[in-house]
Amino acid sequence: MIQDYSEIILASKSPRRKELLGHITNRFTIVPAEGDEVQVGNTPEEIVQNLARAKASEVYSRFSDKENLLVIGADTIVVLDSVILGKPKDRDVAYDMLRSLSGRTHKVMTGVALKSSSKEKVFCEITEVEFCGISDAEIEEYIKSGDPFDKAGSYGIQGDFAKYVKGIKGDYFNVVGLPVARIYQELKQYGLL
């Protein structure tokens, strides 16, 4: 378990990230980032890392006693042909995203920022995901479930959409929202485990 920090904060309101971080430690609290998500960078990798850094920094700045504080910020994006597919704003956008991903391979990138008083570590984990072909009727049925609307790329691999995932190359948990193995290794190198 994490020993050097008396307070670990996950800068996210995502129940999926909370559950995944729980596989590493149960000694953390949730403090969601409140700032606007502004995409800054020249590549999807830079953008997602900057989003994670901004979340961690914004939450970190709220605390006066930073000596024993570690903040973990994360952001996940879906990238198809170098285009970032964020969370859909409505059913038409969700439909278009799922139609474009059908039968193709895309990348899921999660940027993670670990911020403390002495260090900041930022990295990007990339997983490739291949979908089966998905019919228009299947897309419509999935959209009716409401599941696409809070997820990058309009899908959640861990739910009913799993039946359309032909294969993945990389960390499954990264697609869910947090690269558990990489964070565990980084925290060990950080001297926290």
Image (cartoon, rainbow, N blue to C red):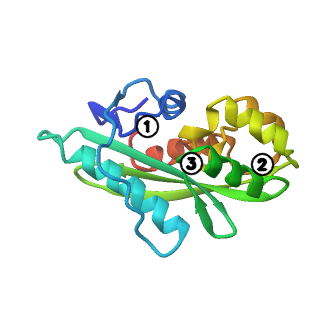
Q: Is residue 158 visible?
A: no
Q: Position of residue 63 (x, y in %)?
A: 16, 40
Q: Which sits in the foreground, 80 or 178?
A: 80
Q: Position of residue 126 (x, y in %)?
A: 63, 57
Left or right of residue 1, residue 43 in this image = right
Q: Tell me whether the residue at label 2 lies in contact with that at label 1, contact meaning CB atoms closer than 8 angstroms.
A: no
Q: Position of residue 34 (x, y in %)?
A: 29, 43
Q: Secondary structure at mark 1?
A: loop
Q: Residue furthest top?
A: 26
Q: Which residue is mark 3?
A: 88
- Between label 2 and label 1, give the one nearer the viewer: 2
The quarter of the rendered structure image containing the C terminus is top left
Badge 2: residue crowd in 10 Å (few <14, some 14–19, many ≥20): some
Q: Which sits in the foreground, 93 or 189?
A: 93
Amino acid type at image mark 3: Pro
Q: Is residue 40 visible?
A: yes
Residue name at image x 46 percent, y 44 percent: 188
Q: Secondary structure at mark 3?
A: loop
Q: Which mark is residue 168?
A: 2
The quarter of the rendered structure image containing the N terminus is top left
Q: Which residue is mark 1?
A: 193
Q: Residue furthest left?
A: 64
Q: Tell me whether the residue at label 3 lies in contact with that at label 1, contact meaning CB atoms closer than 8 angstroms.
A: no
Q: Residue furthest front?
A: 92
In 3D space, how far apart are the residues under numbered discs 2 and 1 (Cα atoms)? 29 Å
Q: Secondary structure at mark 2?
A: strand
Number of marks: 3
Amino acid type at image mark 2: Ile
Amino acid type at image mark 1: Leu
- Between label 3 and label 1, give the one nearer the viewer: 3
Of callouts 2 and 1, which one flags the residue occurring earlier in the amino acid sequence?
2
